[in-house]
Image: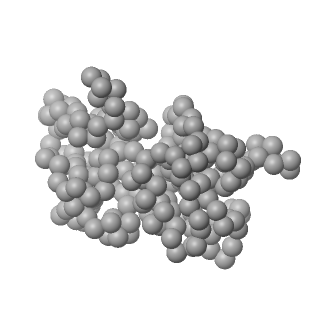
Amino acid sequence: MARKFTQDKLVVASHNPGKVREISDLLRPYGVDIYSAAELDLPEPEETGTTFMENAELKARAAAKASGLVALADDSGLVVRALDGQPGVHSARWAVRPDTGKRDFAYGMEKLHQCLEEKGVDKRHAHFSCALSLAWPPSREEPEGHVETFEGRVFGVLVWPPRGERGFGYDPIFRPDGYEITFGEMEPAEKHDISHRADAFRKLIRACFENA
């Protein structure tokens, strides 16, 4: 049985304001005081995992250890079937411009489009995957701390050109199955209902928050 969250404070182990805002919105009904890793000036650990779950656990454990609070970390990305799963766990790094060394998702989306064009791909099936890890800090009883991890997915296709200015990351080129609009065009509440993060979040809530 998963461990229940009973504290009133939580660190979201991310320096991405869009991601922190989205997770904070999802947690609002549970009356938890949310802090971001950026607010607490926590360092960003190197993401050395080969899966979303490994990276989420790595980030959650690091934030919990550094802050002394329970930490929630997300690792998510876009998986494109025709590109053998790329960009996958490297989704953020894929969007780093070589000329500036800075992350630019407009560049990342263009890069994806060019790769698919070069391969002559018509059916651009893809999915977003999200792993959420909730980590408790180390203690005398648990020197390594404790972690619970859940994964969610949402399937769809990539479109071009990008559409919409809502969301963040690759949202403007991802149209979820059953919809005519992209994540970038969706109202936040609608996206929260169907996204990969929402799927993982529902699993996390059922396991760790409900009836706590």
Give the side of residue 183 with respect to residue 122, left or right. right
- Residue at the image point whose x is 67% and y is 55% from the top: 70
Give the side of residue 21 with respect to residue 169, left or right. right
Q: Quadrant of the N terminus?
A: bottom right
Front residue of 204/83: it is: 204
Front residue of 85/207: it is: 207
Residue 196 visible here: yes
Give the side of residue 32 with respect to residue 79, left or right. right
Visual colour scheme? one colour
Question: Total label count?
Answer: 0
- Residue at the image point whose x is 22% and y is 49% from the top: 173
Residue 207 visible here: no
Q: Residue furthest top?
A: 99
- Residue at the image point whose x is 29% and y is 47% from the top: 170
Q: Quadrant of residue 31?
A: bottom right
Q: Position of residue 116 (x, y in %)?
A: 19, 35
Q: Quadrant of the C terminus?
A: bottom right
Give the side of residue 182 with respect to residue 143, left or right. left
Q: Quadrant of residue 81?
A: top left
Q: Is residue 68 above or below residue 207?
A: above
Q: Is residue 11 above or below residue 179?
A: above
- Residue at the image point whose x is 28% and y is 68% from the top: 187
Q: Quadrant of residue 207?
A: bottom right
Q: Residue furthest right?
A: 140
